[in-house]
Image: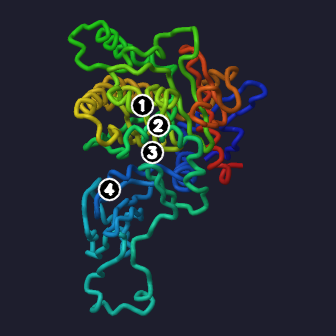
Amino acid sequence: MKPYRLVDLVDDRPAEGVFRVNRALFSDPELFDLEMKHVFESGWVFLGMASQAADLHDYFTTRIGRIPVIVARGKDGVLRCFVNSCPHKGARIATQPSGNARLFACPYHSWTFDSSGACKNVKWHNAGAYGQGFTEEDHDLAPIARFGEYRGFLFGSLSADVPSLDDHLGEARHMLDLVADQSDEGLELVPGRVRFTFAANWKMQLENCSDQYHFTSTHPSLIKVLERRAAGENGAAVKSSLAGADFWKGGDEGIVGGSYIFEHGHVVTWGRMEPNPSQALYSSHTALLEKFGADRTAWMFNMRNLSLFPNAQVAVNASTQLRVIRPIAHNLTEMETWCLVPKGESAEARRLRIRQYEDFFNPTGMAIADDNAVYEECQTGMTGQDGPWLQGHARGLAATRKGGNDLSDRLGMEPVSSVAGPSQLADETLFQGYYHAWLDRMSEVLA
C-alpha cells in the first residue's frame, strides 16, 4: 500500500472553504483492510434490534467487521453478544441468520454451548486424557468487549477502549427517540429481511442515504410514477408520502430541509413534511400531539434519513427502513434491510407501511435499483485511482453554521453543525461528519 498520510486522503481546510476526499478511499483494497480493522473492529457498530431476540433463547447472527458474532437472549432474559466461533477449532456454532436454541452444538466436534454462551459439554471429555492446563481453561464462547442497548437498538465493540454507548450516540439519540417514541410498546421489525450486494465501496451507501442532491437525477422514473399517482392515475395503487413532498420539487423560497452533523460521525438529513393520510403514522397524529406537543410531533412527521457511523441507517420517508451496511471488499458491499415499525399500530397503518416499504425500498423497489447502479458506475470510474480529488463534499459549505438552529432547539438537540435552506441547496457538507469520524478511527495507523 502507498504510504498514505491523513492529509493525502482528506483535504479539510474550512477557512479556505475546501473539503475534498481522495478516490483511494473507495478504490484501494489495502486501505480497505485497514478500515475493517480500525473503523469496524475497533469501535462501536450497530448490531441489530432487541426485538430480533425477543424471547428466551432467541438469537440472531451478524458480524462486527470480519468477525462473526451471535446476539442471544439467555434463559435469564439477558441479551448477550459473543463471538460466533467454537474455542476448540474455530468453527461457527450458529450458521443460520436467526432462530431459537437452548443449546448450540458445534458442527465439527459437537462441543455444546447454552444461550448464555457457557460451554455445557466437551464431547467425550472424561476419556480425553486432557492435561491440567486444558481443564483449568475457560471453554465458554468469548463475549465481545462492549455490548449495549439504546431504546431497542443494539450496538457492540470488539475493543473495550471506546466511550460509553450514550457518549458514542450523543445528540443523535434525539433522532432515535423520534422513532422509538411512536409507540409505548417500542419498535419491532416486520418479519423477513432483504439481503443483497452491490459491486462498489461501502461508503457509497453511507453517503447516498444522506444525499438529496441525487434524487431528481437518479430517480426520474420514480418521480414520474409519484406524479402520476398524485394526479390520480392508475388508481394510485400505493399512496406515497413522497408524492406530496416539496424537498425534490425544487422550490427556492423558505426553509424546507437541511442537515445536522453530530459527534462520532452520525448525521441526519431532513425535509419538512406536513402530516397527511399517506403516512402510516397519520392515524396516531392526535395522540402524539397530546403526548408530545406540536414541535416534537412535527419532527416525527418530517422526512429524516439518519446515519449512525459506520454501518446503520434509519430512513423515514416512504415508510421506515432500517439499513445495515456490511463491507465485504473494497468494491463489494452487502446490505440488509428491514421495515422498522412501532409495535401496536393499527392493521391499516401496518398495511400501508409495508406496501410503501415494498414500493420504494429494496432491489425490487423503484429506488434502490437506481442507487445500486450508480454506485457501481462510480466504482468503475474510480478503479485504481488516487487522484484527482473528488469534489462531491463541498456543496453547502457557505451555508454551514456551528451548532444548531431553531428547529433543533425545539428538540433540545445540540448538533456540531447545521445547514438549513431551500430544497435545491441539497447540501453535501454532512458527509464531512463521516470522514471526520473515519479520520479519528484511522489516525493510529496513518501518519
- Image position of 426 (left or right of 360): right
Percent coordinates x, y for residue 113 in the rendering: 31, 73
Q: Do the residues labelled 3 and 4 touch (CB within 8 Å)?
A: no
Cα–Cα gap, marks 2 and 3: 28 Å
Q: Do the residues labelled 2 and 1 touch (CB within 8 Å)?
A: yes
Q: Which mark is residue 173?
A: none
Which residue is located at x 43 percent, y 27 percent? 301
Q: Residue 327 carries which label?
A: 3
Percent coordinates x, y for residue 311 in the rendering: 48, 44
| Residue type pointed to by label 3 | Pro
Nearer mark to the viewer, of 3 and 1: 1
Q: Residue 178 carries which label?
A: 2
Cα–Cα gap, marks 1 and 4: 24 Å
Cα–Cα gap, marks 3 and 4: 24 Å
The residue that mark 4 highlights is 53
Crowding at mark 1 (Cα within 10 Å: few <14, some 14-19, many 20+): some
Mark 2 element type: helix
Cα–Cα gap, marks 4 and 2: 23 Å
